[in-house]
Amino acid sequence: MAGFAKTESASDIHENWAHRMAPAALRPYLTLIRVDRPIGTWLLLIPCWWGLTLALAGPGRTPEIAAAPEWAAGLVFGALFAVGSFVMRGAGCVWNDIRDRELDARVARTADRPIASGEVGLKSGYLYMVLLSLVGLLVLLQFNRFTVALAIASLPLIALYPLMKRVTYWPQAWLGITFNWGALVGYAAVAGTLAYPALALYAAGIVWTLGYDTIYAHQDKEDDALVGIKSTALKLAGDSKRWLYGFYILTLVGLGAAGWLAGLAWPFYVALAAATLQLRWQIETIDFDDPANCLAKFKSNKWFGLLVLLGVVLGGAV
C-alpha cells in the first residue's frame, strides 16, 4: 500500500482461539475490541484493582463494605471491574479506530484494522460502541452514586484521546490521565469518596503509563513521522531511556507514597522492590529500534502491575 514507511511491517492483528471459534461474521468485531491483544484490558484493569485493594486495606470503607467479609467484597467488585474494563476498553478501541481510520490506513501495522480497511462500516462501528458502552453502564450502576458520577466524569477524557496525537507530542500523558482513572474509581467504589492514598496512586499510574506507552510508541515512530502523528517516542527520541528512568522513578515514588498514606505493612514494600527490578529490566534491555522488543517490554508491564497488586493485598492483610 502506498504511503507506508515500512511496507514490510506486519499487521498488529493476530488470530487467536476466539477468532477461530467465532463465526466468520463476528471475527471483525472481535478484532475491533482487540480480543487478540488482552494487554490493553490488563493495563486498564490493574489500576482499578490497585484502587480497590488499597481502599479495602484502609479504614475508610463505607459501612456496607465494612460490614461484609473483606474478601467477598473484593472478589465481587474485582469481577465487576474486570467485566467493565473489558467492555470499556473495547468501546474505546472502536472509538479510536473510528476517529483514526484515515491515519490507520496509512500505517502498515494498523492498515488491516476492520474500520480502516472497510471490513466494518462506520454505522456498524458506532452501534457496536454504543452496545459496549451500555454494558459498561450496567456494570457501573452496581456501585455507589459517587463512583458512578466519578466514572462518568472520565468520558470527555476518553472522547478527546484520539485527537491528542494530532496536537501534541505528549498524547501518552493524556492516555495516562485517562487510563488510570480506574484507580480513583476503584478506591471510591469501596470508600465512597477519595482520599490522599487514591490521589497518590493515580499520579503514580499516570507516569507509569507515560513510560510504558512511550515504549509502545517506538514501534511506529517511522510511520508516525511520515503521516504526521505525534508521540513521546518522536519527541524524546535518543533521550528516551533517560526519560524512562525518570517516569518509572516517579511511578515508584507515587506508589510508595500511596502505600505509606494507606498504612500498608512491610510486604507491600517487598513487592514494590521486586516491581522495581522489573522496571529496571525493561529499561536496561530495551531496544528502541526493534519493534518486537518494544512490544515485549510494553506487554511485560502486566507483571509489574500484578506485583504491585500483590503487595497491596499482602500489605493490607498483615
Image (spheres, helix red, strand yellow):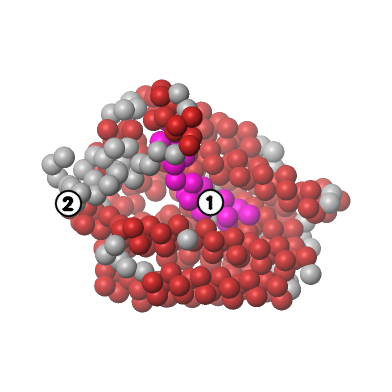
Residue found at x 78% / y 53%: 71
Residue of label 2? 5
* Residue 172 image offset from top left, x and y in percent: 39, 58
**Quarter containing the N terminus:** top left
Q: In this view, does 212 lie above or below 129?
A: below
Furthest residue toward left: 2
Residue of label 1? 42
The first of marks 2 and 1 along the sequence is: 2
- Image side of residue 206 versus residue 97, left or right: right
Nearer the observer, 267 or 227:
267
The verdict on residue 76 being magenta is no
Residue 198 in view of the camera = no
Distance between mark 2 and mark 1 Cα atoms: 30 Å
Q: How crowded is mark 2: few (under 14 residues within 10 Å), some or many (20 or more)?
A: some
* Residue 69 image offset from top left, x and y in percent: 84, 51
Tell me which corner region of the image, top left, top right, bottom left or bottom right, holds residue 213.
bottom left
- Image side of residue 60 versus residue 79, left or right: right
Which residue type carries mark 1? Trp
Residue 119 in view of the camera = yes
SS for tag 1? helix
Which residue type carries mark 2? Ala
- Image side of residue 267 versus residue 38, left or right: right
Q: In this view, does 230 lie above or below 196?
A: above
Residues shaded magenta: 29-49
* Residue 297 image offset from top left, x and y in percent: 42, 62
